[in-house]
Structure formats: structure tokens, C-alpha cells
Amino acid sequence: MSLLDEREKGFEAKYRLDEELAFKVNVRGAKLLGLWVADRLGLGPEPASLYARSVVENALSDPSHKMLLKQLEADLAAKGLAADAAELERQREGFLVQAKQELAAASEQKPT
């Protein structure tokens, strides 16, 4: 195998790992956002878990997250809670950062 082939395989492996990490961060961040909104809605543990799961599914089907944020805003408004899309987007971004940190910490704890 030539050096060029080895480098290509290395780049492909890194790309796969980066894509897998991005997916996990997106899923974890959406779950955290869903749990945060569920808490604001006053949902109990089981309904909150189901709500967070639906947020994850919506996040995966809507890469721009515009429809997701509108739905969350509508859910909060239905309970008389004020939250605009900008606040929800800030929360989403914060949860993405948190998710990335959590996943990085978890990967450091795994035995190699």
C-alpha cells in the first residue's frame, strides 16, 4: 500500500469520526433542549423523556432547526410561557456546546 493510499484511508477514517461526533452532538444537544423545554412546561419525568425524544426526531428531520424552534416556541406559548426563537436558538447552541463537552469527557474516560 502506498503512502498516498494510507493517507487517504486516514482522512476517510477521520471524516467518519468527525461525522459521527457531529451526529452525536446534535442528538445530545437536541435531547438537552427538549428536556429544558419539558421542564419549563412542567412535564414529569416520563412525559419529559418522550417530549425530548420527539425534539430529537424533529431536530434530525429539520437540519435548519427553524421548524423545530417554531414548534418549541408554540409549545411554550400554549402554556402561556414567553420564549422567542432567538432565546431558543441561544439555548440550543449552549446545549450543543454542553453536549460536545460531555461527549469529549466521556471519550476520555473510556479505556483504550
Image: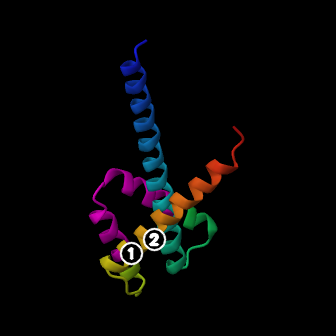
x 57%, y 62%: residue: 49
Q: Would you say residue 60 sits in the magenta stretch?
A: yes
Cα separation between marks 2 and 1: 6 Å
**103 left or right of 23 in image:** right
x 50%, y 78%: residue: 41
Kind of residue sitting beneath label 2: Gly
Residue identified by numbered label 2: 94
Q: Secondary structure at mark 1?
A: helix
**Residue 6 at x, y percent in the picture:** 43, 21
Front-lying residue, 35 or 99:
99
**86 left or right of 108 in image:** left
Q: Residue furthest top?
A: 1
Give the residues in magenta: 50-75
Q: Would you say residue 13 sits in the magenta stretch?
A: no
Kind of residue sitting beneath label 1: Arg
- Classify 52 as above or below 41: above
Quarter of the image for residue 70 reads bottom left
**57 left or right of 46 in image:** left
Image marks 2 and 1: residues in contact by CB distance under 8 Å:
yes
**Residue 1 at x, y percent in the picture:** 43, 12
Visible in this render: residue 74?
Answer: yes
Residue identified by numbered label 1: 90
Front-lying residue, 36 or 19:
19
x 40%, y 37%: residue: 15
